[in-house]
Image (spheres, rainbow, N blue to C red):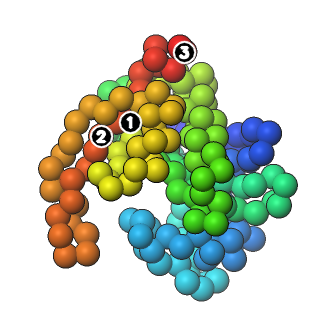
Amino acid sequence: MKLKTPILKSSRLILRKFNPRDSNDLIELDLSSRKIGKINNTKNAKIWIKNSIYDNKEGFYLAVVLKQENKVIGYAELCHLGWFHQKEAGEICYHISKKYRGKGYATEASRLLISYCFNKLKFRKIYADTDPDNFASQKVLKKLGFELEGTIREKHFVKGKWIDELDFGLLKSEWKK
C-alpha cells in the first residue's frame, strides 16, 4: 500500500511536505548533529528536499511550519514502516530548531503525527528512540505517554565513542487514556 504524505494542522503548526521554497529555512535548522548531516547551502537544501519527498511504504518527512511566521522550524518523520508486522506500527522522529525549542512545538508536532497514526492509519503501536543524554527528547516522549522499553547498548558510534540508544513505545490503548 502506497502511503500518501498528510497535511496535519494544530492551532500553531502545520505539518506538510517539504517544498523547494523551504530551502533557506532548512539551512537554518542546523541538522549537523542529526543523521541527516549538515545542509549549509541552497543547492544541498534543495537536493535534500527532493530526496525527502517520498510517498511510499516506508514513511515520510513533514516540515513543521509555524503558522504565525509561515516558517519551517523543524521536521517530523514517520519511518521504518516496512519493519513492522502488517504496517500496524511505525517509528516517529522529530527535530526542532534551537531557536524554537522549549515552547512545546516538538510535543505539539508529535501529538499531531501520533494522532494521525492511531486514528487514520490504525496503528496499534508507535516507536521512538533517543540518545541517553537527550533529556529534552525523553521529556517529550514521556509527556506523550511513551514508556521506556529498553536500552540498546553501544548502538551508534558518534564523535569517536559508542553511545547507547533508548527505545520507547506507545500503544494505542495508552494513547486513548
58, above or below 71, in the image:
above
Q: Nearer the viewer, mark 2 or mark 1?
A: 2
| Three-letter amino acid code of the residue under disc 2 | Asp
Q: Is mark 1 on a helix, strand or loop?
A: strand
10 Å neighbourhood of mark 1: few (<14), some, or many (≥20)? many
Tell whether 168 sits left or right of 72: left
Q: Nearer the viewer, mark 3 or mark 1?
A: 3
| Three-letter amino acid code of the residue under disc 1 | Tyr
Q: What element carries label 3?
A: helix
Q: Is mark 2 on a helix, strand or loop?
A: strand
Q: Indicate the position of residue 78 as horizontal and vertical percent values.
A: 49, 44
Residue at image mark 2: 167
119, above or below 165, in the image:
above
Residue name at image x 64 percent, y 83 percent: 42
| Three-letter amino acid code of the residue under disc 3 | Lys
Residue at image mark 3: 176
- For residue 147, say whether it is visible: yes
Answer whether labels 2 and 1 touch (C-beta < 8 Å): yes
Distance from disc 3 to disc 1, alpha carbons, whole Å, reads 16 Å
Residue at image mark 1: 127
Q: Indicate the position of residue 18 as horizontal and vertical percent values.
A: 66, 60
Q: Indicate the position of residue 48 as horizontal and vertical percent values.
A: 54, 71
